[in-house]
Image: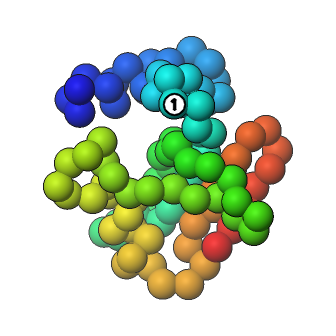
Protein backbone atom coordinates (compact mmCIF):
# COMPACT_ATOMS: atom_id res chain seq x y z
CA UNK A 1 0.00 0.00 0.00
CA UNK A 2 2.90 2.39 0.65
CA UNK A 3 3.59 2.51 -3.11
CA UNK A 4 -0.02 2.95 -4.24
CA UNK A 5 -1.72 4.98 -1.50
CA UNK A 6 0.23 8.26 -1.98
CA UNK A 7 -0.86 8.36 -5.64
CA UNK A 8 -4.50 7.69 -4.77
CA UNK A 9 -4.34 10.28 -1.95
CA UNK A 10 -2.96 12.86 -4.40
CA UNK A 11 -5.75 12.16 -6.90
CA UNK A 12 -8.51 12.39 -4.28
CA UNK A 13 -6.91 15.57 -2.94
CA UNK A 14 -6.97 17.17 -6.38
CA UNK A 15 -10.58 16.11 -6.96
CA UNK A 16 -11.71 17.56 -3.60
CA UNK A 17 -9.54 20.71 -3.93
CA UNK A 18 -7.32 19.69 -1.04
CA UNK A 19 -10.09 19.09 1.49
CA UNK A 20 -9.71 15.29 1.64
CA UNK A 21 -7.48 12.37 0.80
CA UNK A 22 -8.50 8.73 0.68
CA UNK A 23 -6.62 8.19 3.93
CA UNK A 24 -8.42 11.10 5.61
CA UNK A 25 -11.80 9.78 4.50
CA UNK A 26 -11.01 6.31 5.87
CA UNK A 27 -9.38 7.48 9.12
CA UNK A 28 -11.42 10.56 9.94
CA UNK A 29 -8.28 12.68 10.41
CA UNK A 30 -7.99 16.29 9.23
CA UNK A 31 -5.98 17.31 6.15
CA UNK A 32 -3.49 20.15 6.63
CA UNK A 33 -1.29 21.89 4.10
CA UNK A 34 2.30 22.32 5.30
CA UNK A 35 4.66 24.68 3.49
CA UNK A 36 8.33 24.37 4.40
CA UNK A 37 11.57 25.77 3.02
CA UNK A 38 13.49 23.17 1.04
CA UNK A 39 16.70 22.10 2.75
CA UNK A 40 18.86 22.06 -0.41
CA UNK A 41 17.65 24.86 -2.67
CA UNK A 42 15.69 27.00 -0.21
CA UNK A 43 12.50 26.94 -2.28
CA UNK A 44 9.04 26.66 -0.74
CA UNK A 45 7.74 23.08 -0.63
CA UNK A 46 4.06 22.25 0.00
CA UNK A 47 2.73 18.90 1.15
CA UNK A 48 -0.68 17.79 2.38
CA UNK A 49 -0.60 15.89 5.67
CA UNK A 50 -3.00 14.19 8.02
CA UNK A 51 -3.18 15.21 11.62
CA UNK A 52 -5.44 16.35 14.37
CA UNK A 53 -6.04 19.69 16.03
CA UNK A 54 -4.99 20.24 19.64
CA UNK A 55 -5.59 23.18 21.96
CA UNK A 56 -2.69 25.33 20.79
CA UNK A 57 -1.85 23.93 17.35
CA UNK A 58 -1.99 20.98 15.03
CA UNK A 59 -0.22 17.62 15.40
CA UNK A 60 1.29 15.75 12.43
CA UNK A 61 3.37 12.59 12.51
CA UNK A 62 6.32 12.05 10.18
CA UNK A 63 5.59 8.37 9.51
CA UNK A 64 5.97 8.30 5.68
CA UNK A 65 3.34 5.54 5.29
CA UNK A 66 5.18 3.35 7.81
CA UNK A 67 8.49 3.31 5.94
CA UNK A 68 11.80 3.30 7.82
CA UNK A 69 12.92 6.65 6.36
CA UNK A 70 11.14 9.83 7.42
CA UNK A 71 9.47 12.04 4.78
CA UNK A 72 11.32 14.91 3.11
CA UNK A 73 9.33 17.65 4.86
CA UNK A 74 10.66 16.37 8.19
CA UNK A 75 14.25 17.02 7.10
CA UNK A 76 13.27 20.44 5.71
CA UNK A 77 11.97 21.42 9.14
CA UNK A 78 15.15 20.16 10.84
CA UNK A 79 17.49 22.03 8.51
CA UNK A 80 15.80 25.41 8.99
CA UNK A 81 15.72 26.24 12.70
CA UNK A 82 13.32 28.95 13.80
CA UNK A 83 10.12 30.11 12.06
CA UNK A 84 10.34 28.20 8.81
CA UNK A 85 6.93 26.74 8.02
CA UNK A 86 3.28 27.58 7.57
CA UNK A 87 0.46 25.13 8.29
CA UNK A 88 -3.02 25.69 6.87
CA UNK A 89 -5.87 23.68 8.36
CA UNK A 90 -9.25 24.15 6.73
CA UNK A 91 -10.31 27.16 4.66
CA UNK A 92 -8.78 30.43 5.76
CA UNK A 93 -7.11 29.19 8.97
CA UNK A 94 -3.33 29.16 9.12
CA UNK A 95 -0.55 29.32 11.62
CA UNK A 96 3.19 29.70 11.37
CA UNK A 97 5.92 28.25 13.54
Furthest toward the bottom, the residue is 82
**Residue at 58% of width from left, 59% of height from top?**
59
In the depicted view, which residue is nearer to us: 3 or 73? Answer: 3
Q: Which residue is mark 1?
A: 27
Report the front residue among 93 and 36: 93
| Quadrant in which the C terminus appears | bottom right
Vertical relation: 56 (above or below) 59: below
Residue at coordinates 47% horizontally, 66% vertically from top-left? Answer: 37
- Number of residue marks: 1
Residue at x 20% of width, y 57% of height: 69
Residue lying farthest left? 68
Q: Position of residue 48 (x, y in %)?
A: 51, 42
Q: Using the image as rendered, state which of residue 56 and residue 36 is in the foreground.
A: 56
Eyeballing the image, is 61 above or below 10?
A: below
User: Looking at the image, is 15 positioned above or below residue 35?
Assistant: above
- Residue 72 percent coordinates (x, y): 32, 57
Residue 19 locus on image (x, y percent): 65, 29
Can you say which quadrant of the picture contains the N terminus? top left
On the question of residue 44 being in view, the answer is no
**Placement of 15 over or under 49, stated as above or below:** above
- Measured from the top left, where is residue 3 in percent x and y? 20, 29
Q: Is residue 27 left or right of residue 6?
A: right
Q: Please identify the quarter of the rendering in which residue 55 is found.
A: bottom right
Q: Which element is circle 1 on?
A: helix
Which residue is located at x 61 percent, y 45 percent?
Answer: 32
Amino acid sequence: MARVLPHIDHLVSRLTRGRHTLTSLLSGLTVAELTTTGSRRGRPRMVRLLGFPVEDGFVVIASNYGKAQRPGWYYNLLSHRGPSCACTVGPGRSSQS
